[in-house]
Image (tube, helix red, strand yellow):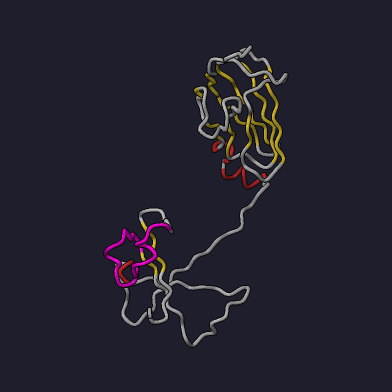
Amino acid sequence: MSGGYEILYIMESSYDPNVASYTTMNLFTQQSQFDIMYVWAPKSDPSLPSDFTAGDEMTIYPYTVTVPFIAPGYPLYYDFTTTKAIIGSSSLATNRGDLDKIRVVPNPYYGYNQNQTSTVDRFVTFRRLPKKCTIKIYSLNGDLIRILTKNSDDPTLRWNLRNLESVPVASGMYIALVDAEGIGQKIIKLAVFTPEERLDF
């Protein structure tokens, strides 16, 4: 009926199979009666095999209205390229100044992290870390609070806001020293405001 097209509709609302209008009405002929945001209608090429095999590539040719100008007689192509991530290169990290990109979030920590799953699961996250590094956390008077070590491809590392004895830290300012061997060091100031504790007896 659709002339060899596969039509994909993207709605503004979530799909609900229990809504009669989605199942009884014809989306193709009654499009104006639905909250359709986008329609994608690719067309197959009859000169090519219809079966797909591993390694096949799909090329998407956009409508000409998506570009400001097209020279007559010249086909329009969009090229998409990707590059493999380079992980664990100390020289590359040094040359790009990646230490300056390291952050800890949330900072300040106001007694709550939106990624927490419970009131006792408190943490802050160090982001954009190198593959190997050590993070030493100090109080303002120089006391060592916690040591975190990392040796993985994951660029993040969590601190559960507990000290060396696994006791929750008090509210205050802390200094995090990120030491990345072969790259350098970075100092981050972190403010922690812990919520009031409730003890159940």
Q: Residue at x 62, y 47 (%)?
A: 92
**Image spot of residue 185 (x, y percent):** 64, 31
Position of 150 compared to 83: left or right?
A: right
In the image, residue 153 sits, relative to residue 35, either above or below, namely above
Question: Does 29 lie within the magenta span?
Answer: yes
For the image, the number of numbered tags is: 0
Q: Residue furthest left?
A: 32
Q: Residue at x 57, y 29 (%)?
A: 118
**Image spot of residue 76 (x, y percent):** 39, 74
In the image, residue 94 sits, relative to residue 27, either above or below, namely above
**Image spot of residue 73 (x, y percent):** 34, 82
In the image, residue 162 sits, relative to residue 130, either above or below, namely above
Q: Residue at x 38, y 70 (%)?
A: 62
> Which quadrant of the figure has residue 115?
top right
In the rendered image, which quarter contains the C terminus? top right
Position of 66 compared to 145: left or right?
A: left
> Which quadrant of the figure has residue 4?
bottom left
Of 26 and 179, nearer the camera is 26
Question: Does 27 lie within the magenta span?
Answer: yes
In the rendered image, which quarter contains the N terminus? bottom left
Of 129 and 40, nearer the camera is 40
Q: Which residues are magenta?
A: 18-38
Q: Residue at x 53, y 82 (%)?
A: 50
